[in-house]
Amino acid sequence: MCINIAEDILPFINKNTYSEVIKMEKLDLLYVGKAKKVFSTEDPALCIFEYKDDATAFNGLKKGSFDGKGIINNQMANFIFRLLEKEGIKTHLVEELSPRETLVKKVDIIPLEVIVRNIAAGSFSKRYGVEEGTPFVSPTLEFSYKNDELGDPLINDYQAIALGVVTREDIDTISDIAFKVNEGLKKIFMNIGIKLVDFKIELGRTADGEIVLADEISPDTCRLWDAETNKKLDKDRFRLDLGEFGDVYREVWGRLTEYYGR
Ligand code: ADP
Ligand code: AIR
Ligand code: ASP
């Protein structure tokens, strides 16, 4: 595969880290998403993500990209998942195969976007008229029904159970994982001078029925503010046309690797 690597990304790539043991090939293209392509492999329980450089916002209405975004998000998401695994959180991650590609356990995605917030921002501020930046007394938890055509509408636990999407037991498991991820992520980012404002995760069921953290965690899926200046270091720079879109992703990835090593 030909990978076009932006020069400024090169320092972040250590080719020696790629395993010579796992040689899983991409077979059929199963799905082309807004940020990733998903491929089948010879093992039906595994699939390969290929991260694109594309960015979308407002349910795909706004489109953009920057060179090397897929490389940063692939590596950053895997790096964060490994740190969360150390906190006891189970994830779909198997192995990073290349700068843009990762082998993951194929899961049945639960069609809920699970959103945790520590500080008011985005749709919460808009919906409830709460000034952006207002810290919450305790973290909030909300679910959106994953459906691009409907614009991922908010859904509550009773509605999700009524639709047969999840059981009450699943909701308890999902909520537990979401708050654990919040505690893990808050710590990870606090160590590098970043406030975790909010984030979205997706969960899925593995072949043996276990619910694990899936998809990705990156500045595409979190709101991250510099702890001293409150500068936005995430996809809001693209959503709100604030500039420095690629720069802030490189900044977050640079801080993570500098603090935690690679
Ligand atoms: P979108 O579907 O929102 O455009 P992406 O471009 O990120 O999102 O595409 C990745 C797709 O793969 C998403 O639909 C996501 O729900 C799904 N997915 C994430 N993790 C897994 C997994 N482990 N197994 C199967 N599908 C997954
Ligand atoms: N998010 C929600 N849908 C897709 C994503 N990436 C994330 C946002 C933000 C959080 O969920 O990136 O971190 C809450 O978003 P909002 O728009 O509801 O305020
Ligand atoms: N992920 C959604 C989209 O790509 C929503 C967002 O991030 O703003 O449109």
Image (cartoon, grey):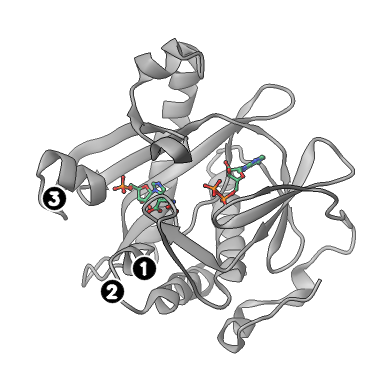
Q: How crowded is mark 3: few (under 14 residues within 10 Å), some or many (20 or more)?
A: few
Q: How far from the left and from the top, in percent, is residue 151?
A: 39, 40
- Which residue is at the front of the view, 13 or 82? 13
Query: Does mark 2 have its CB less than 8 Å from ligand 3?
Result: no
As drawn, the label of residue 101 is none
Q: In this view, does 29 lie to the left or right of 91?
A: right
Sequence-first tag of 3 and 1: 3
Q: What element carries label 3?
A: loop
Residue type pointed to by label 1: Phe
Q: Do tag 3 and tag 1 residues touch (Cβ < 8 Å)?
A: no
- Foreground: disc 3 or disc 1: 1
- Foreground: disc 2 or disc 3: 2
- Which residue is at the front of the view, 190 or 152? 152
Q: Is mark 2 on a helix, strand or loop?
A: loop
Q: In this view, does 119 lie to the left or right of 105?
A: left
Q: How crowded is mark 2: few (under 14 residues within 10 Å), some or many (20 or more)?
A: few
As drawn, the label of residue 242 is 2
Q: Is mark 1 on a helix, strand or loop?
A: helix
Task: Tell me the distance, in whole angstroms, between the alpha carbons under discs 2 and 3.
Answer: 21 Å
Q: Residues within 10 Å of mark 1 (few under 14, many from 20)?
A: many
The residue that label 3 is drawn on is 134
Quarter of the rendering occupied by the C terminus: bottom right
Sequence-first tag of 2 and 3: 3
Residue type pointed to by label 3: Thr
Task: Tell me the distance, in whole angstroms, between the alpha carbons under discs 3 and 1.
Answer: 22 Å
Task: Tell me the distance, in whole angstroms, between the alpha carbons under discs 1 and 2.
Answer: 6 Å
Q: Which residue is drawn at 54% across and 34% down?
A: 203
The residue that label 1 is drawn on is 238
Q: How far from the left and from the top, in percent, is residue 154?
A: 33, 31
